[in-house]
Amino acid sequence: MSVATGTVRGAAPAKTPTIYNVTSPGTANVEFSQALSSNTKQFIVRVRGTADLQLSFNSGESGTVFLTVPRFASLHLDALDLVDVTLYMQCSGVSQVIEILEWT
């Protein structure tokens, strides 16, 4: 069982968008990460290319305990109020751009 690091509180309206374009490593299935801003209210994550994405909230678990975001799909989580949350990811393709849109 995985326990997400960070705190989740009751959500308030989202006001400020931030876009992250994170390039996966030059080797497939290697973990990389992106920290989210404090008080993230919602986020969307997808691969710009043709690879699947494995997403976890704990370091070292993106290959064992993860959500799969299939190629050509996106994951949208809303009604959040996250603090100190980092997304840990692995991608089935090399040098893929991961698009993350967060709202705080």
Image (cartoon, rainbow, N blue to C red):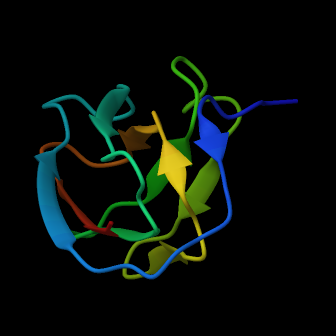
Residue at image position (55%, 76%) is 78
Pick the residue in front: 7 or 97. 7
The picture places residue 19, in percent across and down from the top left corner, at 14, 66
Which corner quadrant holds the N terminus? top right
Q: Quadrant of residue 18?
A: bottom left
Where residue 80 sits: x, y (%)? 58, 65
Direction from residue 61 to residue 98 in the image, left or right? left
Q: Is residue 13 above or below residue 46?
A: below
Indicate the quadrant where residue 87 lies: top left
What residue lies at 62% left-to-right and 28% top-to-bottom? 5
Residue closest to the far right? 1
Q: Residue at x 52, y 75 (%)?
A: 12
Q: Where is residue 65 in the image (x, y as percent from the top left)?
A: 71, 35
In this rendering, the answer to whether 63 lies above or below 8 is: above
Judge from the rendering whether residue 70 lies leftward or rightward of residue 1; answer left or right.
left
For the C terminus, give its image quadrant. bottom left
Which one is in front, 25 or 102?
102
Compared with 36, 68 (above or below) is: below
The residue at 58%/58% (across/down) is: 68
Give x and y (percent) for residue 72. 37, 81
Instruction: Tell how many labels.
Output: 0
Q: Which residue lies furthest to the top in this view?
A: 60
Towards the viewer: 6 or 4:
6
